[in-house]
Each structure stands twice: as C-alpha cells, then as structure tokens.
Image (cartoon, rainbow, N blue to C red):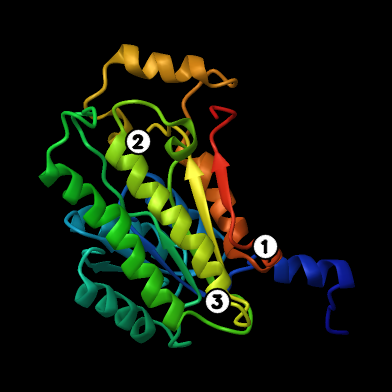
C-alpha cells in the first residue's frame, strides 16, 4: 500500500496550525487575568511556556497542569520571580533555558503589573504608593525587557511584547501613577525596537482598555464599571480572550513587519 502523502495545501496547514511549535515563551504575571489567557493562547499555538508568578503558586501550578494535560511531554513550567528584582529576573531566564531542549528563549511577554486599589488622585497618592507602582510596572518591565534584549533568539522569531494600558491615551483621572508607569514602558519599547536593529527581534506594546479582571474590579463600584461599559462602542467590558489573540499574532512570524508599535485593544474605548 502506498504511503499517504499530504497535498501542498494540507502540508502548509499542518505546519501553520501550530506556528509557535518548539518555541519557548516566558509570560510574566501568568497565574491569573490577562497573563493567564495569554499563556493558554500561546500554548494553543504550540509554544512551550514558563508560567511566571510572584505569590500564587497554586494558580500557577494549576495553569501548568492544564497545559501539560494535553501533551505527552511537559510544555509548561511554573517559575516564581519578582520582576522588580534583577537577580530573580536573571534566574527566570536561566530557568527557561534549562527547562526545554532548545535551551533558548524566543518570546517574552511581560504581563506582570499592579494598580492602586484605592484609585487615588495624584494629590492623594503617597510617595510610597507611587514607588510601589513604578517598581513593578516600569522597573519590572525594564528589567525583563533588558534581559530579553540580551537573551532572546536573534535572526528571526525573537519577540519582546510588553503589556501597557489604553489609559496612557485616555488619560482618565484617578490613575495618574499607573498611567505614567505604563507611558514609561511605551517610550522604552519604541526605543528598544530601534536599538535591536539587525537582530530581527521585534519589540511591541499591547495596551488593553478596561478588561474584566480582578485588578479592574478591585476598589470599584458597580456604577464605575457601568460607566466604563457606556464609554465603549461595543457596550461591554473587554475580556482576557480579547487580548490574547493579538499577543499571539505579535509572537508569530507573521508579525515581523510590526515593530516598535503600541497596539491599543479596547473596543473603541479610546
């Protein structure tokens, strides 16, 4: 009996159905919220995952188990690291290189971030709260982007994707330090994209609008959330699944010509 062969179209579909097969992605802040959805989506595209978390080991392990349950070989490894600590960030990348056969990191997605749960005005924000927000959102993004700039795959396929916020564009009140920390990341990403010239490593930001996560809901009333819904042309809050496919595209080879950009994903909120 003749050996079955794939038609040219079927062969292409077979290859492109898992466009991130055997690539290694680090997703920070991956145990919940947007980071969790991104990790699941990249896994569905074939990537091997480092599931970074700070404190909730149970959620991170549950996510890794969920991803690994559909694969004969482990494809997701939970790793604890505080992105604001340079030593821990280096260790995070070391662990990624040790965990998979390719011994490299192809994709970094920085989704770790915090907000002010009290939603204070700038006049009401304490210096300590300002420093806390900038330590994770700005310094943390700098540290992981710096490490990635030195260690992700060069010559094709290297991707640095930093999550920011549509608040940088909407400039809503009661979010001054948070918006400022994310604006710093957007400026840094655009500069880093130019500094990576010749490496074929792309650097982009994904800037979600209001996404229905614990971080958005914490400290807000039903009236606050209803107001956000009314400001969106789609008349709803965003979901984590609205963000993850965009990150998946930016992580893929098809996105190579998208570089140094801030992509706002917010349903028309701004």
For the residues marked 1 and 3, what is the alpha-carbon distance in whole angstroms?
16 Å
Q: Secondary structure at mark 2?
A: loop
Residue at the spot of label 3: 196
Residue 180, percent from left and from top: 35, 44
Residue 89, percent from left and from top: 27, 73
Q: Earlier in the sequence, mark 1 or mark 3?
A: 3
Q: Nearer the viewer, residue 224 or 10?
A: 224
Query: Does residue 73 appear in this view?
Result: no
In the rendering, which numbered label is found on residue 213?
2
Residue at the spot of label 1: 255
* Other-residue count near label 3 (Cα within 10 Å), few / some / many at <14 / 14–19 / ≥20: some
Asked if labels 3 and 1 touch by Cβ distance under 8 angstroms, the answer is no
Q: Earlier in the sequence, mark 3 or mark 2?
A: 3
Q: Secondary structure at mark 3?
A: loop
Name the residue furthest top: 223
State which mark lies toward you, 2 or 1.
1
């Amino acid at each position: 009996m003749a050996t079955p062969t794939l038609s040219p179209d079927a062969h292409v579909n077979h290859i492109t159905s898992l466009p991130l097969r055997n690539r290694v992605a680090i997703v920070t802040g991956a145990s919940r919220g947007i980071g969790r959805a991104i990790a699941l989506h990249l896994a569905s595209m074939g990537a091997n995952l480092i599931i970074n978390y700070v404190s909730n080991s149970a959620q991170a392990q549950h996510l890794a188990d969920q991803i690994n349950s559909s694969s004969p070989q482990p494809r997701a490894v939970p790793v604890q690291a505080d992105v604001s600590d340079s030593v821990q960030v280096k260790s995070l990348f070391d662990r990624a290189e040790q965990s998979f056969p390719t011994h490299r990191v192809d994709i970094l997605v920085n989704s770790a971030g915090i907000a002010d749960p009290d939603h204070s005005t700038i006049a009401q924000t304490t210096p300590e709260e300002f420093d806390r927000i900038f330590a994770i959102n700005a310094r943390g993004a700098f540290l992981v982007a710096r490490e990635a700039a030195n260690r992700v795959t060069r010559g094709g396929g290297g991707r640095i994707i930093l999550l920011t916020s549509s608040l940088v564009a909407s400039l809503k009140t009661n979010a001054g330090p948070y918006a400022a920390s994310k604006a710093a990341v957007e400026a840094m990403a655009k500069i880093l994209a130019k500094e990576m010239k010749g490496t074929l490593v792309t650097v982009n930001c994904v800037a979600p609008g209001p996404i229905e996560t614990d971080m958005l809901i914490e400290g807000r009333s039903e009236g606050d959330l209803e107001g956000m819904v009314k400001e969106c042309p789609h008349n709803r809050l965003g979901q984590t699944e609205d963000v993850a496919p965009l990150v998946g595209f930016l992580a893929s080879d098809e996105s190579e010509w998208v570089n140094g950009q801030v992509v706002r994903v917010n349903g028309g909120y701004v």
